[in-house]
Image (tube, helix red, strand yellow):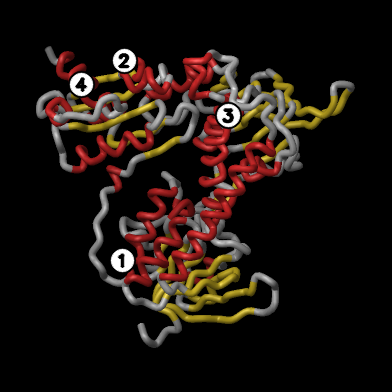
Amino acid sequence: MTSYDYDLVVMGSGPAGQRAAIQGAKLNRRVLLAERKAVVGGVCINTGTIPSKTLREAVLHLSGYRERNIYGASYQVKQNITIQDLHFRTDHVIRHEIDVTRHQLQRNRVEVAAASASFVDAHTVRLAAADGRGHRDITTAAAVIATGTHCTKDGHIPFDGKSVFISDDVLTLDKLPRTMAVIGAGVIGIEYATMFATLGVRITLVDKRDRLLSFVDREIMDALAYHMHQNRVTLRLGEEVSGVEPITDDKGSRVKISLASGKQIITEKALYSIGRTGATDQINLGAAGIKTDDRGRLKVNASYQTEVPHIYAVGDVIGFPSLASTSMEQGRLAACHAFNVEAKSVPALFPYGIYTIPEISTVGRNEEELTQEGVPYEIGKANYREIARGQIIGDSTGLLKLIFHLETRELLGVHIIGEGASELIHIGQAVLAHKGPIDYFVNTVFNYPTLAECYKVAAFDGINRMG
């Protein structure tokens, strides 16, 4: 590798790229990370995961959502919540995370180039200065593509960033609307739909699929749909959008959305969220001998190698599950494989965290998957309202569901909706990793009062169902 300028060049400084670069540096390799934006962190820190989750936390706090079951539906920490109130918290967290990321790269001695990276050939990368002042070519033994994605846009939609906008534009809204339509019921669409609904915005959610998030356990998604209905969200599933048109009349500027079924939706604003496209159009993949699919995404093998073995791709640019947590792990594994360092992971046990209101988290297999595979199973459930901690925090909608093998009693899946779901899931994840039986939860003592008790209650419920 000494014949090259660098051992590893990473394109993109999001979670996947950052972790790949740091892992390479910890293996004493010469690593360069190229980021075309003015700040590090990629979509995750600047416009995606961190802003949206911070926005969610601000919504939960200012709206008084967590206390409504105790103090009443009219309870709010702040009346007349403005978009500026939400920005205050979000801006602070973004600045902090950018600083933390920059410091991590510095102390691991990763060279960071503020430049747009593109391939000249399979081992040569061109770094075009972000300020437009020239470029330089470098050679590298291995490369990791972690360029992430950008919002998919339909050329027929009249985007203006204000009345018709994408998720990246949410932080630039000037005020909260009274009504809003969300086109696309993927993870991002549902998260923003529930956030704005919690703030009192009348939401209409449109998607051509007939159910929400098919990769999540149906019972959990049914519970979320019920909660959304209770929060005045109108679900238009199995409906296709045929047109989006801004209109102006004596009632002001609004948006008319036409559906293929003939229905019409009149709303103040429309959030267009039909998925994301791989940000690969500017890195000259053809020069390296790599092709993308029709959404700009890259195909990789189990070691995250593209069709060119020394070039890897990780994170959102390779598609599902497109989560920051899984992207980080992919970056680490790719860097280890590039330098022949053994590293193991269990993708089947990657947890999913969906930050709707209420939040959802899941790990392992669900009922639909087990039924298709012909695996005999039983379930056990615990409702938050039956747990002392659930009453204390005022969450009467939460549900923890365990799925276990009917004969061996081995735990097969954990699915949670409710406060703290994304934290609570890791208890079940640990038991799944060790192929533990459901009896583990029966024999374990949990702190009281905690939501973790749900595991014991659900385990007893499952055993009782077995007779």
Relative height, residue 211 to residue 310 (above, below): above
Please tell me whether mark 2 sits on a helix, a strand or a loop: helix
Q: Amino acid at mark 4?
A: Glu
Q: Amino acid at mark 2?
A: Glu
Nearest to N terminus: mark 2 or mark 1: 1
Q: Quadrant of residue 455?
A: top left
Nearest to N terminus: mark 2 or mark 3: 3
- Residue 121 in view here: yes
Q: Which residue is mark 2?
A: 386
Please tell me whether mark 3 sits on a helix, a strand or a loop: helix
Cα distance between the residues tagged 2 and 4 = 21 Å
Please tell me whether mark 4 sits on a helix, a strand or a loop: strand
Is disc 2 surrounded by few (<14), some (14 to 19) or many (20+) residues within 10 Å? some
Cα distance between the residues tagged 2 and 1 = 46 Å
Cα distance between the residues tagged 4 and 3 = 33 Å
Is disc 4 surrounded by few (<14), some (14 to 19) or many (20+) residues within 10 Å? some
Tell me the mark number nearer the camera, choosing from 2 and 4: 2
Q: Which residue is mark 3?
A: 193
Tell whether 143 sits left or right of 63: left
Pointers 1 and 4 in contact (C-beta within 8 Å): no
Residue at 63% x, 79% y is 135
The quarter of the image holding the C terminus is: top left
